[in-house]
Image: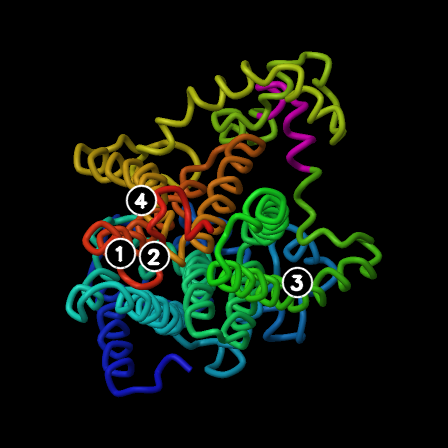
Amino acid sequence: MLINTRGNAFWFAVYFLFSVCIGVLVRDISGQPDLFATAENFMAPESVTKLNDSISFVSGAMEIYHHGWVQPQSQWLVKLWPPGFMATEGLIFKLFGIDAPFIFILLLLNAALVALMLSLMRVNALAVTSPLVAALLPIVPFAFPVTRLFLLQPSGIVLGEGLSIALFMTSMLLVPMAVRRRSLPLGACAGLALALAAYFRSQFELLVVLLTLGAVLLVVVYFLFFRKRLSDKDRQHINYVIKTVAVMLFSAHMVMAPWRIHNLYEPSTGNTSWVQTKILVFTNAGKTDQELIDAGGEWIVLGGGNVACKVEPSYCGKSEEGRFYEALMHHPVEWIAYKAAAFPDYWFSSLKNFTLIRYPATAVGFVTNFLLLVLVFLNIFLLLKIRRHPDFPVYFWQCLSFYACSFSIFLLVHYETRYFYALKIYGAFTFFTLLPVAWNVLKSPRINGLSKNKTWFRYE
């Protein structure tokens, strides 16, 4: 569907080689896992690094390799994390053997997904800018070390972050293409990619929920306040946007349904939650600093994971969801101020830090993180600039949902430095996706498809 011309196939190959070269040749931090390590070497005591989650993933993958699925004594693995990444590593062991250089194979898979994402970004940019600019813009975000690290380098690869973010960005880029081409199958593919992203990282399940809620909210607002004021042409366009988004979200929920059903009928869970970590949030929130530190949870204390106990002492010792949200509602200013005070330390942290802030940020790291923060806010400015463009409803919905998801996570869950990486990467790629659209609008405000009205679309 994407690679149907020589030009698209050529640029896919270029982006793939570019991605592989970054993964193999570039190193942004020291102490990254050996690219050609086997599972046995990777899990050896002398090789275990700060990437403890990655050890758990390989452990689960080896059980899938040996037994076909995670064994009962290890069911906690698929309660803390969705099964996508462990199943992928297990499949690699099945296909290539337990002694295969699985990280290198993951790098190639990552590179292919990233190449697909960059190719879609180029195709979208071709609609509003020159072929040369459209081809170069997708690689600009890799000037930021965090993008290289999490999408293509071993430290990010062994955490499954690269696969999930590439799948999510692919999903987001497919939607405007589907609308532009009037292709509901493309919309369904966007839903499939979104669901797969959730299977690799649980944060994207929350994003599916917020994308759904955001779509419903915006559709209600549209019918209440805008529909009657739009021209027939604009109503037809918005109706197709709604239809495409509906197909996308329906596909995503259908692909995610099997895992929810599995959890519902699994005796040790008995619910449709994507992962079973929510109770940990409420439990940790009710513990004192010393209780968490004594249990080895210093990183939870420093990340503000027990803010509920701090602002509402009566919650200490509790683990109730209702009481947790009551503490937030009763003390919103103190809660937000507490989390906001820790935000700069985590946002401007060194890439060497994945949970705790153990290494000081460098001057270069501070500058790049500052630029990424600027891009996150500039995306809002660009959305305002393209509000008369037909692609605006899609990009507004996506950005609103992603930012709401990020804010919810930062507000309710303890901070870890790597929790900020997805927002940084999304902010960079979204900026360079919206930039040519905004430039096109400013350069040619009266081209076909744009409204002459300064507010939004063509009002009759």
| Gap in angstroms between the C-alphas marked 2 and 3 | 33 Å
User: Above or below — where is 224 with respect to 69?
Assistant: above
Q: Residue at x 48, y 33 (%)?
A: 415
| Gap in angstroms between the C-alphas marked 3 and 1 | 39 Å
Contact? badges 3 and 1 (CB < 8 Å): no
Question: Which label sits in the foreground, 4 or 2?
Answer: 2
Checking the image for residue 253, the label placed there is 3
Checking the image for residue 385, the label placed there is 4
Contact? badges 2 and 1 (CB < 8 Å): yes
Going from N to C along the chain, the mark reached first, 4 or 1, is 4
Question: Which label sits in the foreground, 2 or 3?
Answer: 2
| Gap in angstroms between the C-alphas marked 4 and 2 | 12 Å
- The magenta stretch is 280-292
Q: Amino acid at mark 4?
A: Lys
Going from N to C along the chain, the mark reached first, 4 or 2, is 4
Quadrant of image for the N terminus: bottom left
SS at mark 1 in the image: loop
Q: Which residue is mark 1?
A: 446
Q: Amino acid at mark 2?
A: Leu
Contact? badges 4 and 2 (CB < 8 Å): no
Does the magenta-highlighted stretch encompass residue 328? no
Q: Residue at x 24, y 77 (%)?
A: 11
Question: Which label sits in the foreground, 3 or 4?
Answer: 4
| Gap in angstroms between the C-alphas marked 3 and 4 | 32 Å
Q: Which residue is mark 2?
A: 450
Q: Residue at x 56, y 72 (%)?
A: 188
Q: Residues within 10 Å of mark 2 (few under 14, many from 20)?
A: many
